[in-house]
Image (tube, helix red, strand yellow):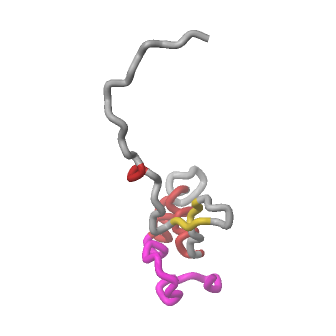
Amino acid sequence: MTEHNYTNPSQAQDLSHLEASIHDDEEKDEHGFTKRKKISDRECIYKCLANCEQMAGLDKQQVQRLIKQFEVMSDDIEDVQSEYPPL
């Protein structure tokens, strides 16, 4: 194998500050990998509703009304008006 004659003109840099950090919504598992923290049932329902707002076959005004109800992001059950029992 032949050797090359190139030498890197730049100085060595300490790039340890560029390591990925853990955000507020992440945690480490038992193997050291990062994963997202679990979300509440209300937040899960809100994200599902927001994703299907434009879905064909659904009443857009009804979905928007439900999005506004679940937008609070708290688990205060009294805010949600429904004919179904609270989660």
Query: Between 64 and 3, which is closer to the camera in this rendering?
Result: 3
Q: Residue furthest top?
A: 2
Residue positioned 36% across, 41% down in the render: 13
> In the drawing, does residue 84 fall left or right of residue 42?
right
Q: Is residue 53 magenta?
A: no
Q: Is residue 70 magenta?
A: yes
> In the drawing, does residue 85 fall left or right of residue 10?
right
Q: Quadrant of the C terminus?
A: bottom right
Query: Between 73 and 11, which is closer to the camera in this rendering?
Result: 11
Q: Above or below — where is 38 with respect to 74?
A: above
Query: Between 43 and 30, which is closer to the camera in this rendering?
Result: 30
Residue positioned 45% across, 64% down in the render: 23
- Say which quarter of the image contains residue 9: top left
Q: Quadrant of the N terminus?
A: top right
Query: Between 22 and 10, which is closer to the camera in this rendering?
Result: 10
Residue 74, how many percent across, how many down?
47, 81
Q: Residue furthest left?
A: 10
Q: Above or below — where is 60 with respect to 42?
A: above
Residue positioned 55% across, 75% down in the render: 42
Q: Above or below — where is 35 with respect to 56?
A: below
Magenta region's main secondary structure? loop
Residue 83, how many percent across, how many down?
61, 83
Residue 33, how many percent across, how many down?
61, 59
Where does the magenta region start and end? 68-87
